[in-house]
Image: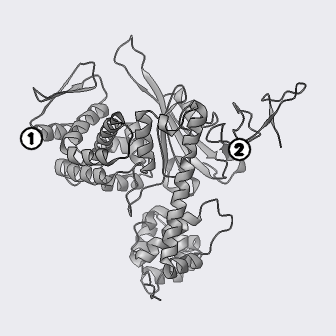
Amino acid sequence: MSVRQRLFAGTQLKQLREKHELRQAELAAQLGISPSYLSQLEHDDRPLTAKLVERVARQFPLDWQDFRSDDTEQLALTLREALADPLFAAPFAPDAIARLAEQQPGFAKAFVALHASYRRTTQRLEMVDEALTLDADDDARLPWEEVRDWFHLSNNYVDLIDRSAESLAHSIAGPDGVASTEALRRHLEDAHAINVAIAPGEALRRYDPRARVLHVAAAQTGPSIRFQIAYHVAATSLSAAIREIAESARLKSDAARELLTIGLANYAAGALLMPYGVFRRSARDCRHDVDRLALLYQTSFEQTCHRLSTMQREGERGLPIFFCRVDMAGNITKRHSATRFQFARFGGACPLWVVHEAAAIPDRILVQVAETPDGLRYISIAKGLVKSSGRFDRTPRRFAVALGCEVQHAAEFVYADGIDLLSERAATPIGVSCRICPRLDCDQRAYPPSDQQIAVDLFRRGVIPYEMKT
């Protein structure tokens, strides 16, 4: 049997304590150890035990990712995350998890892979929900639905595109990675002999290949103009990588492949404007305050939220969040979850979720503690947005975006400040959609769950016109 490498992490522990402005006694209390023991750990006189690894990872999940650790520790961490699923009622001891990762790494990896497969199967409940709603099977999906599912099942992270865009951003803007509109224009001109013309126009972005001019509509906001230029920079400079991924994707139609190409270029534009490494650090420094990040990176609220949902690089993950965009009719037009939170694929999402209220109240951030049927709680924010059409006779586009994380990450999410997360009354019970929600006592239910039979009484009427047979 191999001898497990002991983990000395004194420097990282001290940096973590100083970052959170904690005294030794305060951090020691959080970890359940004495201040003198913590002092020994910080001076590398003693290694971290499995129990302490568990406590540090639980108390500071994002900071723990940056700790120095060997492959066994990384495996133990991913195994610990899988075993934290509410599916398992009893907690597993940290020492047992560490021993399993050390002594049976093959089994531990297989278990983690099996749990990931279970999660993907759970996600496909959304597709079942769609089929029930539309009386359609998987083969009937429209091209844009195929592309949306491709990104969702790819965990909303495309490594080749993301790293290529990050490298391109550094070459355009330098180490800070924030490429100004003027820097993007110069890159198009110097690298591709393409000029940018910002002027009134019907199309938000239109490229004239003969004149080699990119026309961008001036009526857009500054962040939108910058994104349109970044899109063309990415589509031109990273065309080979985008084409490689689009051609290898398992899609059923050429239309879906073309839409995926556009989606990958949009993804690359976001990664170009908000390069992974510097953006991840900024997000953590300001505790994922979207408005602060948007000002820092000259991006819109929606663009910033979307980018936060793509922080899924192996070994450098960001805050596990969910993100979606909902229109005024309740249709979810963008969605991704790096958490255990599930979305309805189309309209019919839970009416108790705050995103529906936000769609009618623009430019105001609403905060909600939501509890899903599996007992997990989330801090959820939603903001209504309006995109002007630039003309009186055309209706502006109105929608809302939602962003959230599990309450265990509340310390990293500025929107959780001031909320009593332990209060039983603080959480709003929500579900995915009425068709698959098991809550039988919900007054907002639109129709019964698909796996229940209803009982109708001609002489009794409750808030909803039927009851479930027990």
Q: Residue furthest top?
A: 393
Can residue 110 be seen from the camera position used here? yes
> Horizontal and vertical percent for residue 317?
41, 58
Q: Is residue 338 above or below residue 455?
A: below
Q: Is residue 140 above or below residue 268?
A: above
What's the residue type where badge 1 is placed?
Asp
186 left or right, relative to 399:
left
Q: Nearer the viewer, residue 341 or 54?
A: 341
> Horizontal and vertical percent for residue 238?
21, 46
Local packing at callout 2 (Cα closer than 10 Å; few below 14, some 14-19, many 20+) is: some
Label placed on residue 190: 1
Colour style of the rendered protein structure: one colour
182 left or right, relative to 221:
left
- Say what secondary structure mark 1 lies in: helix
**Residue pictured at 64% horizontal, 47% vertical:** 372
242 left or right, relative to 122:
left
Camera-near label (2 vs 1) is 2
> Decide: marks 2, 1 in contact (CB < 8 A)?
no
The tag earlier along the polypeptide, 2 or 1, is 1
Can residue 325 be seen from the camera position used here? no
What's the residue type where badge 2 is placed?
Pro
Q: Which residue is mark 2?
A: 438
